[in-house]
Amino acid sequence: MPTTRLHIDFVSDVSCPWCAVGLGALEAALRNVAPEVTAELRFQPFELNPQMPPEGQDTFEHLNQKYGSSREQQAQARAAIRARGADVGFAFSEGGRPRIYNTFDAHRLLHWAELEDLAKQAALKKALLKACHTDGENPSDPEVLVRLATESGLDPERARSILASDEYAAETRERERLYTDAGIHSVPAIIIDNKHLISGGQPVEVFERALRQIAGAEPARTAEA
């Protein structure tokens, strides 16, 4: 069977726990469909909290204000997502993140990483998700961002220069508008070949079935954006 190569745009935010689950499930599905189906995976920006101040906000306070959830409800939600994360090999901190931070600079670095090397962009994305959801680090701290960029194989001095300027800010804002104008208002949103949309942190089998259908191995039943 000939190989089908798909173009996948993974629209997500570093601060989104379901994005970590969705990415783990998508990568597992891609392993399952290889080598018949392969993909070029790119990470696109979306900010859940674009107005978040530099100092961030207490996580309970933020979620309580946004959704009206109690401490007990938040603890139940954390337990559920820890279980989903474990299914795809992602470890969430048991106590959850102490604070939620602005992620715009992280998206600027991811935009730069995409221009440098897609494998390094993927490494940086996963490093950012781990730093935020496993280690409870601040993804808006320039020192954290430079360290993660370095660990992902990117030039630390170039990363530091970008963070000290507004480089890639306009491009990142333009990308964000592109997806919100297209109707993306929650993440993760996985767009395949610019027309098929899979929303949310779906199980591995849902991604796998969709990938096979879109590649033509099965009758297509996926939703289109």
Image (cartoon, helix red, strand yellow):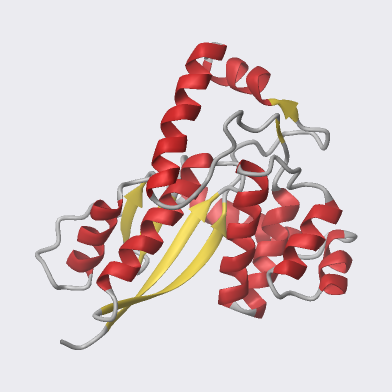
Which quadrant does the N terminus fall into?
bottom left
**Could you tell me residue 97's position as x and y percent?**
65, 33
On screen, 175 above or below 78?
A: below
- Most extreme residue toward the bottom is 2
Residue at the location (45% across, 21% down)?
A: 76
Between 41 and 193, the one lying in front of the other is 41
**Could you tell me residue 89's position as x and y percent?**
45, 52
Between 28 and 107, the one lying in front of the other is 28
Which quadrant does the C terminus fall into?
bottom left
**Could you tell me residue 71's position as x and y percent?**
56, 13
Residue at the location (69% across, 39% down)?
A: 136
Between 89 and 81, the one lying in front of the other is 89
Q: How many marks?
A: 0
On screen, 93 above or below 105?
A: above
Position of residue 172 in the picture relative to residue 213 (left or right): right
Snapshot quadrant of residue 29: bottom left
Position of residue 102 in the picture relative to residue 22 (left or right): right
Position of residue 111 in the picture relative to residue 94 (left or right): right
On screen, 138 above or below 171?
A: above
Residue at the location (80% across, 65% down)?
A: 167
**Could you tell me residue 122's position as x and y percent?**
56, 67
Residue at the location (36% across, 46% down)?
A: 199
